[in-house]
Image (tube, rainbow, N blue to C red):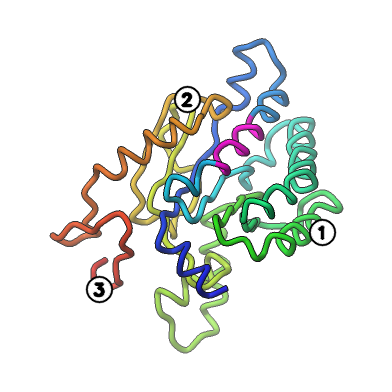
Amino acid sequence: MQSEITSRNDKLHVGIIMDGNGRWATRRGLSRVRGHEAGVETIRRIVETAPKQGIGTLTLYAFSTDNWRRPKAEVAALMTLLRFYLASEVQSLVRNGVRLTVIGRRDRLPEGIATAITRAEAATADGGALHLRIAVDYSARDAILNAAAKAAALTSLTREAFSQLVTGEAGLRDVDLIIRTSGEKRLSDFLLWEGAYAELHFTERMWPEFEASDLTEALAAFHNRERRFGGLQAILPGEVPSLSRV
């Protein structure tokens, strides 16, 4: 497992804010739920292409803590889609070497979903081609706050140790690139700690329209940027800067 983690950390960590499902559907005279269903199809496409494009970890923003404010019918539909994804995609993820992790709170999810998440994570635990992290009932600020509460009991603390408290796992590579679809230009409480030095890419594409070619375009733009992490010397895209460079 350690060698698989090392291998993934040699590749990029990309986060995607999957925005625009509802607007995509509304513009076509469809229900917002149909837009979310189309968004699931896009997830399949991007998960399939991500390892081929040098991505080792892919974090997708599926449902924020603030999304509970949406109409009850839409929230219920989103939870049904999550349940369906967990049930229908596990075998495909296993075949393709994809490890699935769900981040965020689980205590507020409808009955049975937390158990389905645990089973899916266990079934895909050996996947070494891609680490797929799906953020559900997720808030970056809450993750940092919870980590701070745990850190208060420690006598000493390093950035690496605090990062593990925030993310829930050791050795997770910081986010290299955050993509947001639909033309909105904000982070919306997504990966604030892990994405401190992430490059940002905004596209007008709605999430259901997002294709492998759009991911290629975003990565091409990323590779053309010079990342210095606060220093004067550029860091190559595949490198992970040491804390002394940050």
> Quarter holding the N terminus?
bottom right
Residue 105, given in percent of the width and then of the height, sits at: 68, 57
Please state the horizontal and vertical placement of residue 224, each as a whole percent of the image.
24, 42
Q: Residue furthest bottom?
A: 155
Q: Main secondary structure of the magenta part?
A: helix
The magenta stretch is 39-48
The amino acid type found where label 2 is placed reads Arg
Residue type marked 3: Ser
Residue underneath mark 2: 205
Q: Magenta segment: does it hold 42? A: yes
Q: Residues within 10 Å of mark 2 (few under 14, many from 20)?
A: some
- Disc 1 target residue: 115
Q: Earlier in the sequence, mark 1 or mark 2?
A: 1
Q: Which residue in the rendered view is the most extreme toward the left?
A: 232
Q: Secondary structure at mark 3?
A: helix
Viewer-proximal residue, 206 or 209?
209
Query: Spatial distance from mark 1 to mark 2, Cα to Cα?
Result: 34 Å
Can the viewer see residue 33?
Answer: yes
Secondary structure of the residue carrying numbered label 1:
helix
Q: Are marks 1 and 2 in contact (CB under 8 Å)?
A: no
Mark 3–mark 1 CB contact (< 8 Å): no
Question: Who is closer to the viewer here, 188 or 15?
Answer: 15
**Residue type of the residue flagged with mark 1:** Thr
Nearest the eye: 161 or 189: 161
Q: Please provide percent x and percent y for residue 203.
A: 41, 29
Q: Residue at x 21, y 57 (%)?
A: 228
What separation in Å lies between label 3 and label 2 (alpha carbons)? 38 Å
Image spot of residue 163 (x, y percent): 47, 69
